[in-house]
Structure formats: C-alpha cells, structure tokens
Amino acid sequence: MEDVGKIGGYIRTILTGDVRARREAVDAVVTCGGGAVDPLIGALIDADDNDARWYLARALAMIGESAIDSLIYLLTVSDDPNIARYAAAALGEMGEVALEPVVELLGDEEARIRGYAALALGRMGEPAIKRLLIVMEEAEGIKKECAKMALYRMGGDGAEALARSMVPE
C-alpha cells in the first residue's frame, strides 16, 4: 500500500505547484494506482480553482478503471457543476474502459446527469459513436433520445453517424 503521506504530498503539489511541478506530481500520483483514488476524489471536491481540478481529473483519468465508480458517484451526487464537469471529463478521457458505465447514465432520471454523460461520451470519440448507434436501435424513451443528442453534440463523425442512421435503407 502506497504511503498516504506521499500521496498527500503529490496532491498538495497538484494544488499549489507550478505547471511543471503539477505535471510531475500527476505522473507520480498515478503510479500509486487505486490507493490514490479516494484522496484525489477528496481533493477534487475541496479544490477551489479549475486549474487544480483539471490536474486532479487528469490524474484520475490516468489511473483508469479503479477510479470509474468513484467518478460516477461524484458526477451523480455533486451539486457543484464544476466538480461534476471535471468528473465527466475524466471519465471521457478514460475512453472505452468507462464506456458502458457512462452509457448507463443516459437513462438517469436527472437531466443534468444525462448531460454530463453526454459530455463524457463526446470526449470518447469513435468507441462512443458505435455504442450510441446501438443504444439508438435498442433503447427507448429518454435514453434513446439522449443517445441521439450525444451524437449530435459530438459534431463531426458523431453527427454524420446520426444523420446516416436516420436515412431509411
């Protein structure tokens, strides 16, 4: 288990360091793996500036799969739109490993959560496009509509895929 003090030091540098120091601290805290997830989540909640949030979210994204559940929880319970937005961005940066849990959020009761899910999917690119087209075919109701909207908001390849899917064969 990684030394909690070491993780705390990396997080303090992420919060207060210059650009180079922050980048190095992100790389270092990522090597701590899943043991750094909870302290990073706590720091993301407590951070008072978006630069720090960006570096914290980047570290969580680089840690990957072990951070998914915590980021989804944070995205769904946070009343602070900045925190939820950075949680969504981290999930989006993870790509395919976070695809299915994020797609499930498209069916959430709360519109803001569906919006953050669409934001994350937009960052994922091609893997999300393919999955969203399947959701459009298989899902009904709000989840289907959110899949369409996510493709539209992606623009480029996403919007093109949406347009092709609406043309009768």
Image: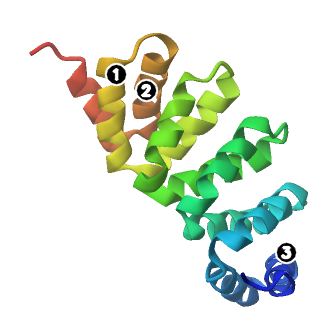
Q: Residue 73's x, y, as percent? A: 71, 43
Q: Residues within 10 Å of mark 1 (few under 14, many from 20)?
A: some
Q: Which three-letter amino acid code belongs to the residue tagged 3?
A: Leu
Dot 2 or dot 1, earlier in sequence: 1
| Marks 2/1: CA–CA distance | 6 Å
Q: Quadrant of the C terminus?
A: top left
Q: Residue 125's x, y, as percent? A: 38, 49
Helix, strand or loop at mark 3: helix
Q: Which three-letter amino acid code belongs to the residue tagged 1?
A: Met
Query: Mark 3 highlights which residue?
Result: 15
Res 111 → quadrant: top right
Instruction: State the residue in front, 22 or 66.
Output: 66
Instruction: State the residue in front, 80 or 97.
Output: 97
Q: Residue 26's x, y, as percent? A: 68, 79
Query: Mark 2 highlights which residue?
Result: 147
Q: Give the side of residue 66 with respect to residue 151, left or right.
A: right
Q: Give the side of residue 10 with respect to residue 143, left or right.
A: right
Q: Which mark is residue 136?
A: 1
Instruction: State the residue in front, 161 or 66.
Output: 66
| Marks 3/2: CA–CA distance | 36 Å
Q: Residues within 10 Å of mark 3 (few under 14, many from 20)?
A: many
Dot 3 or dot 2, earlier in sequence: 3
Helix, strand or loop at mark 1: helix
Q: Are marks 2 and 1 in contact (CB under 8 Å)?
A: yes
Instruction: State the residue in front, 98 or 23.
Output: 98
